[in-house]
Amino acid sequence: MPSHDARIIRGAAIPTAVAGLIAAVIAFAVVGAKGLIGAVFATLLVMAFFSFGQVALDRLTRNNPQIMMAAALLVYTTQILLVAVVLAVFKHTTLFDTKVFGFTLLGCALIWTGFQVRGAMKAKIYYVDPESRDDKPKSGRQP
């Protein structure tokens, strides 16, 4: 994984973890242990799905960077669909507070996405390789 991708993941994971910790403390204070479990589960779910999504995007576009936009849309859509499946599976669970889970999931997903965009914008990743210009001389010959 390129270093800029690792920086983007780290730049999104740290604020998401902090937000999840804050949500867990608030949930524990307001709802109790079930709220704490719901907030922690939602935070871990967001961090797992979205970091694996970044890794999958890196692998999909490593050899063919021209498909970046299509691959990014595919990965993001898959992440959202998987989150929807998890929400449907745990709709009537009694293991944790589902409202806390839902609000923490939404908040962490928004925070992750925002900081991932911020990290990508600050990374200054070139979409054209400046070293592979066609107009520079090859093998010492002058044009």
Image (tube, rainbow, N blue to C red):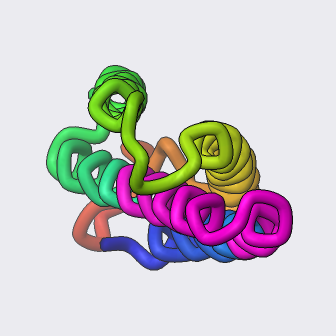
The residue under the point 44% across, 52% down is: 50
71 to the left or right of 23: left
Q: Position of residue 97 (x, y in %)?
A: 57, 48
| Residue 135 versus residue 96 in the image, above or below | above
Frontmost residue, 70 versus 98: 98
Q: Above or below — where is 109 with respect to 118?
A: above
Q: Is residue 30 magenta?
A: yes
Residue 28, how many percent across, how many down? 74, 70
Count of numbered tags: 0
| Residue 136 appears in the picture as rendered | no
Residue 125 is at least partly visible in this image: yes
Between residues 112 and 60, which one lies in front from this camera angle? 112
Q: Quadrant of the N terminus?
A: bottom left
Residue shown at 71% from the left, 75% from the top:
21
Name which residue lies at 57% across and 62% down: 34
Q: Position of residue 65 (x, y in %)?
A: 29, 40
User: Image check: 18 left or right of 4?
Assistant: right
Q: Is residue 140 rendered to the left or right of residue 101?
A: left
Give the answer, above or below, for where 53 lies relative to 51: above
> Horizontal placement of 127 versus 117: left or right?
left
> Magenta part mainly helix, strand or loop?
helix
The residue that appears at 19% across and 40% down in the rendered structure is 64
Where is residue 132? Give x, y as percent. Answer: 37, 54
Query: Magenta region: which residues?
Result: 21-50
Quarter-wise, where is residue 134 in the image?
top left
Looking at the picture, tell me which residue is in the foreground, 37 or 79.
Answer: 37
Magenta segment includes 11: no
